[in-house]
Image: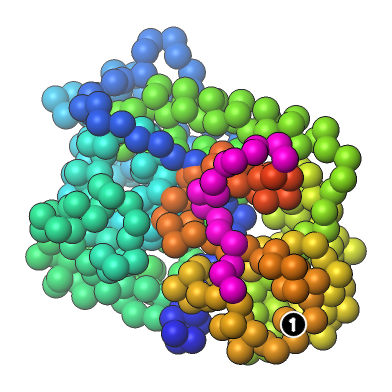
C-alpha cells in the first residue's frame, strides 16, 4: 500500500488544486461548428489557445506549442497550415494518459464522447466513472501500463487501435512515449492543465477537449454556467461569521506535503469560509515541512483535509500507524479529518461539487442534510 502511495504522491500534489465539476447526459453527440460571427475566446487558460478559422475548422496550439489543425469530417482543410498536424474531428480511438483528462472530457455533458476512449493508463479497479467501467467490460476500452515510473508498451498501444493520444507535458515518461508514437505515426497532443493558475483557468480546459469533438459552443455554455455557480457559492460562504481553522496536509516518510499560505488551495479554503491555519508560511504552491512544524502550527486546527484516497488511508487507525503524532491534533481527537473520495482525481472537472463539499464541511449549517460527493470523513 505504501508503494502505491509513493506512486500517486506526485499526482496528488499536482491535482490537489483542482476543484471542477462534470455532469452527464445521454444525448447523442452532434457536430456543431461555431456559428458565423461567434467569438469563443480563451479568457483565463495560459497553456493552450484556439483560433477559429471558419467552417468548423480550428487551429489549436497545445502546451508544448504544437499546432493541430482540427477539421470536421467532410470539410476541406484550408491551405497555409502545413506546419500543423491535421486532425479529423470528431476524434475516435484515443489514448488518455491521465484520469484527469477523462474527467474534463466528462464535463462536456455528452456521453458519446466516451466512445473515443480506446485506452487509459489506470486499471479498471481504480475507476469510478460508469461510462469507462462499461467500456472496460465490453472490451472497447483497454488498460495500458504507462505511468511516471514506466513507459507504455508501444506495441500494446498499437494493438488497441489508438490513433491519437492526450499526453502530459514535462513528465519524462510521457516525453518518451511521444517519441515512440512518432515512430508508428500515432498523432498526439501535450497538456499542462495542472500548471494553470486558479479554478477558471483550469476549468477552461473543457474548451480544449470540446474542440476535438466539435462541441465548442456547448463547452462555452457549460464553462460560463459553472463559473456562475461558483460565484453564487463564494457569495454564500462570504456571509459566514464563525470561520473554522483549516489545513491541508499529507504525510509521507515523516515529511508533511502541504500548501503554502498564498497557494490556490489556501485561497479556496478562505473563500469557502475557513481560515487557513498556515497562511503565514510563504509561497504560492506546494511546500514540505517537518511533522514537528506541522504539529506546532496546526495542533489546534479545527479541520484537516488529508490529501489521500480511501484505498491508501482507510481509517484513523491507519493514519495513526503512519504517524503517531497525529493523536496530538484537535482535528484528530474531534473526528474532523477528511480525505478525498475514490473518484476525486478522475472527476477533475467537478469544481462546483468539490467546492460545495468544502463549504459543507466548514459550514454544514449552510447545506443541511447534504451528503458529501467528492470528500469523505476519515472513518474511525
Residue drawn at the location 24% of the way across and 55% of the way down: 133
Q: Please, is residue 4 above or below residue 131 in the view?
A: below
Query: From the viewer's perspective, is residue 374 above or below residue 123?
Result: above
Q: What element carries label 1?
A: helix
Left or right of 118, for residue 220: right
Residue drawn at the location 27% of the way across and 74% of the way down: 145
Residue nearer the viewer, 66 or 248: 248
Question: x, y percentage for residue 284?
Answer: 76, 59
Q: Where does the C terminus fall, quadrant-wise? A: bottom right
Quarter occupied by residue 216 = top left
Residue 48 is at least partly visible in this image: no
Percent position of residue 277, x then y: 84, 62
> On screen, 321 above or below 266?
below
Q: Where is residue 22 in the image (x, y as percent from the top left)?
A: 44, 40
- Count residues near mark 1 (Cα–Cα under 10 Å), then give few for <14, some for 14-19, many for 20+: some
Residue at (33% x, 60% y) in the render: 127
Prevalent SS, magenta region = loop
Q: Where is residue 287 in the image (x, y as percent from the top left)?
A: 73, 72
Identified at 35% across, 35% down, the residue is 24
Quadrant in the picture for residue 212: top left
- Given residues 180 and 252, the one toward you in this image is 252
Q: Nearer the viewer, residue 336 or 99?
A: 336
User: In this rendering, would 42 be left or right of 67?
Assistant: right
Residue 16 visible in the snapshot: yes
Mark 1 sits on what residue?
327
Give whichever of 281, 166 is nearer the camera.
281
* Magenta stretch, residue numbers: 365-380
Amino acid at each position: 500500500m505504501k508503494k502505491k502511495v509513493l506512486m500517486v504522491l506526485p499526482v496528488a500534489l499536482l491535482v490537489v488544486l483542482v476543484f471542477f465539476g462534470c455532469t452527464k447526459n445521454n444525448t447523442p453527440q452532434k457536430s456543431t461548428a461555431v456559428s458565423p460571427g461567434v467569438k469563443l475566446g480563451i479568457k483565463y487558460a495560459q497553456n493552450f489557445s484556439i483560433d477559429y478559422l471558419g467552417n468548423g475548422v480550428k487551429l489549436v496550439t497545445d502546451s508544448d506549442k504544437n499546432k493541430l489543425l482540427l477539421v470536421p469530417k467532410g470539410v476541406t482543410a484550408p491551405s497555409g497550415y502545413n506546419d500543423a498536424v491535421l486532425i479529423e474531428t470528431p476524434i475516435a480511438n484515443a489514448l488518455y494518459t491521465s484520469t484527469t483528462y477523462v474527467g474534463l472530457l466528462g464535463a462536456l455533458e455528452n456521453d458519446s464522447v466516451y466512445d473515443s476512449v480506446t485506452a487509459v493508463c489506470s486499471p479498471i479497479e481504480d475507476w469510478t466513472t460508469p461510462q469507462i467501467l462499461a467500456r472496460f467490460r465490453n472490451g472497447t476500452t483497454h488498460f495500458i501500463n504507462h505511468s511516471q515510473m514506466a513507459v507504455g508498451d508501444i506495441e500494446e498501444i498499437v494493438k488497441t487501435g489508438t490513433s491519437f493520444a492526450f499526453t502530459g507535458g514535462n513528465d519524462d515518461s510521457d516525453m518518451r512515449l511521444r517519441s515512440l508514437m512518432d515512430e508508428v505515426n500515432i498523432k498526439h497532443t501535450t497538456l499542462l492543465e495542472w500548471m494553470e493558475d486558479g479554478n477558471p483557468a483550469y476549468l477552461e480546459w473543457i474548451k480544449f477537449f470540446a474542440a476535438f469533438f466539435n462541441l465548442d459552443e456547448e463547452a462555452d455554455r457549460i464553462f460560463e454556467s459553472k463559473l456562475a455557480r461558483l460565484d453564487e457559492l463564494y457569495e454564500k460562504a462570504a456571509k459566514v461569521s464563525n470561520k473554522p481553522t483549516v489545513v491541508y496536509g499529507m504525510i509521507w516518510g515523516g515529511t508533511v506535503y502541504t500548501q503554502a499560505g498564498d497557494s490556490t488551495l489556501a485561497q479556496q479554503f478562505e473563500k469557502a469560509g475557513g481560515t487557513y491555519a498556515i497562511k503565514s508560511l510563504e509561497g504560492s504552491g506546494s511546500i514540505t515541512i517537518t511533522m514537528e512544524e506541522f504539529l506546532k502550527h496546526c495542533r489546534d486546527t479545527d479541520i484537516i483535509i488529508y490529501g489521500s484516497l480511501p484505498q491508501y488511508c482507510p481509517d484513523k487507525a491507519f493514519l495513526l500507524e503512519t504517524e503517531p503524532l497525529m493523536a496530538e491534533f484537535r482535528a484528530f481527537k474531534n473526528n474532523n479529518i477528511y480525505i478525498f473520495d475514490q473518484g476525486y482525481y478522475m472527476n477533475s472537472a467537478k469544481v462546483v461539487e468539490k467546492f460545495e463539499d468544502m463549504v459543507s464541511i466548514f459550514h454544514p449549517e449552510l447545506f443541511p442534510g447534504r451528503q458529501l460527493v467528492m470528500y469523505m470523513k476519515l472513518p474511525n
